[in-house]
Amino acid sequence: MAIHSQFRLLGQRRFLPFYLTQFSGAFNDNLYKNALLLLIAYQTTGLFGLSVNTVINLAAFLFILPFFLFSGIAGQMADRYEKAAIIRKVKLAEIGIMAIAALALWSGWYEGLLVLLFLMGTQSTFFGPVKYAILPQVLGDDELVGGNGLVSMGTFVAILLGTIAAGLLMGLEAAAKLTAVSVLVMSVLGYLAARQVPETGTDIAGQAVRFRPVLETWRLMGIAAERKPVLWAILAISWFWFLGAAYLTQFPSFAHGNLQGDETVVTLLLSMFIVGISIGSMMCERLTRHRITLAPVPWGALGLTLLGVDLFFAVPASPEPSTWWTLVTDPVYIRVLLDLVGIGVCGGLFIVPLYAFIQYETPQNKRARIIAALNVINALFMVVSALAGILVLGVLDVGIPGFFLLLSLANGLVLIAVWRLGRRTQQESVDK
């Protein structure tokens, strides 16, 4: 069989419309969420009688809450019904949500925007299981790692661009109105792309869909635990989201307090981290030679630990006021940037083979529910990551570089676990 680059998938209808759909969704989520947070921070004194900081944390909670409530139902539906049809209905719902959001932004109805943030989280909850469960149905086994690499790269680049776009829009005079138009236009473009996604066929004609929030989400855990290697892979991915959320959350304070940087430094740190993840994701196909293997995962975990430790020592003890240009020209700061790019690269090497492994090792009739379970555990780990940051930085009064060091050392335990997982799955492959 001839081996081709993963990028050829971007020229094929079985992949490109889906790729554009998920890219536009990730972009719009982050554009809307970050624009709303900036509007609340700079144009209000609080909502519902609450302070600005409390409202911002409430907004983050409202976006993630649907993953705990509705993931069980979303997984059942993705296994029961034709996946392309679900994608189109979810994107159509996004147009409705964004149309109301546009009116709320235009009129300055911020309380309504918070409710809509919950609905956007719900829409993302129902898209999540389909997003990864559809790939094994439209890609061959030798394309699965490359396809996941493209999806991972696209998701993180969309997050970056959505975040930057929100910041740029907030600097304009008619920020809220321009944001209203932007989110509505992006939702329409996403739906147009979704209409081109080819049908995949219904998976389980008899699969029941039980509308029992929380209970069905809890039952996902039992399904995910049916095969221990798959469960360990799920926990490993969730650990990366714990780690990634910790880095991304601390970048603004890290840039301001430890690098004495302005707002351009925050954007640069975020960009370098995501560029690294994109590079690592793209490297996976070549490193795995188009095979479903966890071989790159332990090396990615090792890099996350070593580069995280080096980042601790790379932070200048007495930083001078800096801009993005300082960071790319001063050797002291260049080391910080290289560490962040390296951490991102290792993150890509870490998660992409794990996603492909989960998709390959799970039966088709349960795949979407297992992906839904992964989404729930990811959300839980990100919540715990925020709590860990509060504990270490606030209660224990450890500095941000020290927090990054603790995360890197904790990752050493994950390294041991994934090394054993890789050896076990390799032995099982030989036995087969």
Image (tube, rainbow, N blue to C red):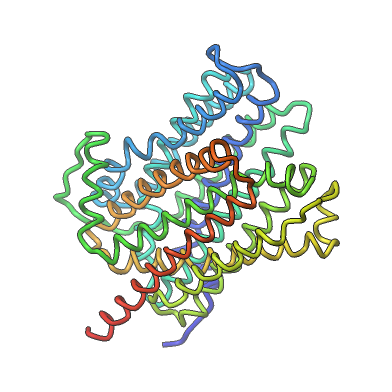
423 on left or right of 264:
left
Residue furthest left as drawn: 206
Numbered-mark total:
0
Image height check: is 424 above or below 120? Answer: below
Residue 229 or 145: which is nearer the viewer?
229
Relative to residue 144, is residue 230 drawn left or right? left
Residue pushed farthest top?
49
Residue 23 locus on image (x, y percent):
54, 52
58 vs 82, nearest the viewer:
58
Residue at 41% from the left image edge and 41% from the top image edge = 90
Q: In which image quadrant can residue 362 be found?
A: bottom left
- Percent x, y for residue 136? 35, 66
The residue at 53%/31% (across/down) is 98
- Name the quadrant containing residue 113: top right
For image coordinates 36% across by 48% down, the residue present is 377
Left or right: 430 as drawn, with respect to 289:
left
Nearer to us in this view, 245 or 366? 245
Residue 193 image offset from top left, x and y in percent:
51, 50
Left or right of 407 in this view: 121: left
Rendered residue at 52%/55% (across/down): 407
